Image (cartoon, rainbow, N blue to C red):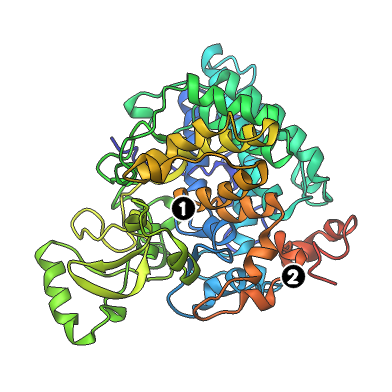
Amino acid sequence: MKTRYLFLYIVLLFSSFGCENFLEEIPRDIVAPENFFNSEADARQAISGIYAILKNNSLYGQVGLDHFYDNGADIIEPNRAADFVEPIGNYSMNESLAGVSIQLMSVSDTWKDLYKIVLNSNIIIARVTNNSAIPKAAQTQIVAEATFMRAFAYWHITNLWGDAPYYEGELKIDEIKVLGRTPEATILAGIIKDLQFAQDNLPATLTVAQRGKVTKWVAATVLAKIYMKQKNWKAGLDKSLEIINQSGHKLLPNYASVFDPSNEYNSEIIWSLDFAKDIVSQFEVGVTALAGNGNWRPSMFNPRLRDEPAKTSERNALAAALTARGEAFNGTGLQITSKDFAEKFPKNDLRRPLNVMQNYLGFDLVFPYMAKFMNLKLDTSPRFNHSDNRMVFRLADIYLMAAECQNELSGPAAAYEYIHAVRKRAYATQAEWELKGLTQQQFREKMYDERKWELAGEAHRRYDLIRWGILLDVVKKLEYRFWKPNLNIKPYHVKLPIPLQELEANPNLLKSDPTNNGYRN
């Protein structure tokens, strides 16, 4: 059952700053804290407001985070030279472009929304802890949920910017406005502390009414990813095995079933944000023409009829065939399978049709599409108004993480079982899926590809390439359709610049690093 997030968006206190600096106070948007947390219902509504921020276009509602985690790597590219995805994908980003907002999405929007989550989470934690109006058990869970949200926002912040403003507690706005950048390692230590608290205190399972919220296994997943980034392979393996052995999540026998929009809460999915068609949040009132109602993301993967099929003389026939099925090619085509990915994806891999769709209803297509994220149904999933959930984490990722950690600890012998669990459903015969006789380095390189084929387009790729230290090497070998990322990429592109307007509002952001992550060199 979809959770209908029609909440006040109470945003919590500072959620709609528009294009203002993320710390600028707008009194009309503030609900006085002393009048807010007067009951458990108030506190839970505040937590719901944070989920609403996560579903903004700058984060998970469109392809906001996808730009940073997938574009500019070797899986996704647009079907044309589109301006609003070019700075990331083509490595032409700079401080000024980081502040340009197109379709409610920019580096600046992502920065602001992540810090809104930090701000709101800190307020919830402070106002719920020891609040006599809220039962003790409810306090613990609400604080754990807010603590996870703070850690999750900071995790993304460190992934994207490295050193960054960091604070816990309920600081005054004037105090927050002058914060400098804290070293990434210090922030990660705080994140790990928060995530372990969240794992210890969040529920292991959810009721139907709670679907879309986080569990202890979501916290464990982020912890495992951080341990791997730190090359703490033992801790990463232990945390991955906790999830595999204790969570109750199971791999589905069929890869396509994982992405079935009619089975969005299947056992493989650890966390997905639930969306509903025809729901307009308070944030969207007044900008509905731009923002749409439901989830934007499937429209970014859906084809445009004006681009297809390969034989333009068959366009009317394709349109008629789609209409007969209650479907339409009415997407943007701005998130399609890259040329490099389509050419290299193994032909005998059963995952290929879901990741490289080159024919539909018997019509050959101009571009290869990632079918697993498409939804062409007009009645349930119209353009920019999709009810499709946004998958964040799933169990196959965890199995591959366990395989990688085990290989780094002791070599391939004990790692095969984890990678085989994923590969078995990807090939027709054991001779195809079974790996054996690999050296540790060969297994490591096999992981580079296996995570690419299994998790394509799921916002992991640039994170993986960066933590492996191979982003530049991979991108320099790419051939894109319209761009030249291989010519443009520089070593500093592993991080984003802090947007210019943030630097102007708070010069302290430049004190520890006058180069702004290398963008002022």
- Quick one: 187 or 133, which is closer to the camera? 187
Quadrant where the image shows the C terminus: bottom right
Q: Which mark is residue 453?
A: 1
Q: Position of residue 289 (x, y in %)?
A: 37, 67
* Quadrant of residue 431 within the rendered picture: top left
Residue furthest to the top in view is: 136
Label 2: few (<14), some (14–19) or many (≥20) C-alpha neighbours in 10 Å = some
Placement of the N terminus among the 4 image quadrants: top left
Q: Say the numbered circle drawn on residue 116.
A: none
Is 355 on the left-hand or right-hand side of 46? left
Identify residue type, mark 1.
Trp
Residue 328 image position (x, y, % from top left): 21, 67
Q: Residues within 10 Å of mark 1 (few under 14, many from 20)?
A: many
* Kind of residue sitting beneath label 2: Lys
Q: Quadrant of residue 502?
A: bottom right
Who's the residue at 70% across and 73% down the image? 96
Given residues 485 and 2, the one toward you in this image is 485
Q: Which structural element holds mark 2?
A: loop
**In front: mark 1 or mark 2?**
1
Residue sitting farthest toward the left: 324
Q: Residue furthest front?
A: 437
Residue 335 can be seen, yes or no:
no
Q: Residue at x 67, y 78 (%)?
A: 487
Is 123 above or below relative to 392?
above
Cα separation, mark 1 vs mark 2, equals 26 Å
The residue depicted at 46 percent of the width and 52 percent of the height is 453
Q: In the structure shown, which secondary structural element does the residue marked by tag 1 occupy?
A: helix
Reading the image, the residue beneath label 2 is: 490
Residue 320, image x and y in percent? 11, 73
